[in-house]
Amino acid sequence: MTAETPVLASLYQHSVADYWNAERNPVNLRLGDVDGIYHHHYGIGEVDWSVLEGPEDTRDKRVVEELHRLESAQADVLISQLGRLRPHHRVMDAGSGRGGSSFLVNARHGCQVDGVSISESQVSFANEQAKKRGVDDKVRFHFRNMLDTGFETGAFQAIWNNESTMYVELAQLFAEHSRLLARGGRYVCITGCYNDAYGLPSRAVSQINAHYICDIHPRSTYFKEMAANRLIPISVIDLTAATIPYWELRARTSLATGIEAAFLDAYNNGSFQYLLIAADRV
């Protein structure tokens, strides 16, 4: 980025950055405190409901650890789709939050990771975590806009978005990802999208948009804009059923934020879907 191209290019992006700069939600921070991996996404898999039983004074601790386990399982599924990565490869975490997925990719594959975020507080937090983990020579976080990163063309073997595509226009995002990816490189996203077959966004989807200051895209737009930007899907996995137990558990805990009912309503009525899409750059 240069002085002529500021990181925050619109009033909307300023509002999103302000939201995440101020965010100190326990459902993110307390879960990350479990093992130092701070996720900013949701979980998948079967819940161990026994965490709600047993001594009341340790109930919150058990619930936090279980929610974190489910979120880590989601990250593992995304990482498994990134292709054959080697230590000499460079990869990018687009909308990197506090860095959780970046550290997991580096730990598994040894490759260089660049995370980008428009939240300066998250970038600072993640870089401090990299120093604490002793990987700041390989994992770096940048205050940059994922729509215009300033990185060199073809520099990356893999790029991923983990629940961050709803903050940007997909045409611009996939054009930038296509530019950054080497030919044959891999793009992966996990995202919530509204179901075209349902019609327009449901009331529950609109509530989610309002809560997170985002704009959830229809499922069709992902495939349309990927095809327009030389990103050809090789795998599409519907994770909707797999994420519902996570939300059912979260709704019954002290960590609930009030948006849980909207997610459960949207998933159960079919208006909202939780998808993983992996695509090759051709």
Image (cartoon, rainbow, N blue to C red):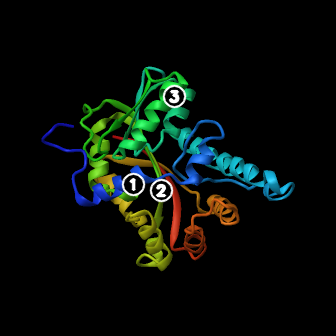
What is the C-alpha distance between the residues marked 3 and 1? 22 Å
> Which amino acid, by three-letter code, is at mark 3?
Asn
Front-most of residues 95 and 219: 95
User: Looking at the image, do the residues carrying marks 3 and 1 touch, with CB atoms under 8 Å apart?
Assistant: no
- Image location (x, y in percent) of residue 184: 38, 35
Q: Which residue is mark 1?
A: 165
> Which amino acid, by three-letter code, is at mark 1?
Thr
**Mark 1 surroundings within 10 Å by alpha-carbon count, few (fewer than 14), some (14 through 19), many (20 or more):** many
Q: Quadrant of the C terminus?
A: top left
Seen at 52% across and 39% down, the residue is 101
On residue 191, the disc is 2
- Image location (x, y in percent) of residue 64: 69, 50
Seen at 59% across and 67% down, the residue is 260
Seen at 35% across and 42% down, the residue is 120
User: Looking at the image, do the residues carrying marks 1 and 2 touch, with CB atoms under 8 Å apart?
Assistant: yes
What is the C-alpha distance between the residues marked 3 and 2? 22 Å
Residue at the left extreme, as displayed = 4
Residue at the right extreme, as displayed = 54
- Image location (x, y in percent) of residue 278: 47, 47
Q: Which residue is mark 3?
A: 106
Front-most of residues 95 and 227: 95
Residue at the front extreme, as displayed = 57
